[in-house]
Amino acid sequence: MIGSATHTYIGGSEGFIRTQVISIIMGLIAMVVILMIDYNSVARFWIPIYVVCNGLLVAVLLFGTGKETWGANRWIRIAGRQFQPADFVKIGIIICLAKLISDNKETINEPATLLKILAFAGLPMVLIYKQPDLGTAMAFAFFTFGMIFIAGLNFKYIFLSAITGLISLPLMWVTGLLKDYHKKRIMIFLNPELDPSDSGYQILQSKLAVGSGMIFGKGLFKGSQTQYGFLPEKHNDFIFSVIAEELGFVGVTILIALYAIMLKRLINIARDAKDDFGAYLVIGNTFMLAFHIFANIAMTIGLMPVTGKPLPFISYGGTFMLTNMIAIGIILNVNMRRDKINF
């Protein structure tokens, strides 16, 4: 699909495919290395991991690049190569949260414990929001909530969170905490026709591509929105639209079914984990992957504002692919040690 999405680019698709293949190979190597290490041994270093993660995010604010091209400094360039630290930080923070929550499971519903966990997760979220990267900050909020929920969060806190969310959005709107481009995204989400040639262009072209694919699609390399350049960011953020246009309803149904099978198996691994730390590790990574899947698909069909979240294992992006495979490696690590007895 990346080959099709980049087929008409100047220079062709070879460079994109090569980068993606290299990322997959690196991901496989990382998975092998991860499987050789007992995940419980990593738990001992959760505080240094937390410090390094936040240090990387501070480095992005100080030395990051990308604002000229993408409107936000989210990347760090080293030796001519750039990577997005926030992707790796997600994995690090999940490890730290899994340790923190497992150590405080018995008191998870005490306000002091909840505030400690939320403050712990809140610092990297604020640093990411300052880049600015609201989409990734939302991913952090999603997997943090998922891990606390699975740990036994009382429903009264869920209810209070929902009420707070409903109240805070208009307050953020009027007090200026929401930036102008955030407000514009929300307005365009509600009515893309407000600015069809600029801010609403992406979602309008995406919905046109998705709808035109119909049942069986137009065929690989034959999508008009894709091949004639109407669809923006088609090799990463809007790759689902390419699949829908060229492979149709059948293609996206198979893709979503594969995602559902994967997520179901990940949940089973969490259920069978031999300890709480392992279970929360799996749950955190599962919620992270689930958020990206849902957010990307919902964004491309107009059910969510455009957040720039790529589609796991499909979208182009070396750092993102490597991060996803590391997440799966950690989950497999927990699974292969589910019956191990420590003496």
Image (cartoon, helix red, strand yellow):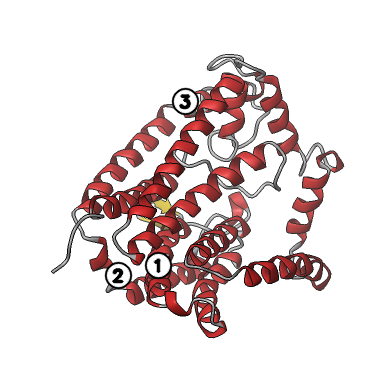
Q: Earlier in the sequence, mark 3 or mark 2?
A: 3
Quick check: 100 above or below 330? below
Q: Position of residue 249 (x, y in %)?
A: 61, 22
Residue at 35% across, 77% down: 47
Residue 9 showing in the rendered view: no
Which residue has dot 1 on it? 98
Q: Which mark's residue is nearer the viewer, 3 or 2?
A: 2
Residue at 39% across, 70% down: 96
Q: Position of residue 19 (x, y in %)?
A: 38, 37
Please tell me the numbered disc located at residue 259: none
Q: CA distance from mark 3 to mark 2?
A: 40 Å
Quick check: 272 above or below 4? below
Q: Position of residue 217 (x, y in %)?
A: 61, 17
Q: Residues within 10 Å of mark 2 (few under 14, many from 20)?
A: some
Please tell me the numbered disc located at residue 43: 2
SS assignment at label 3:
helix
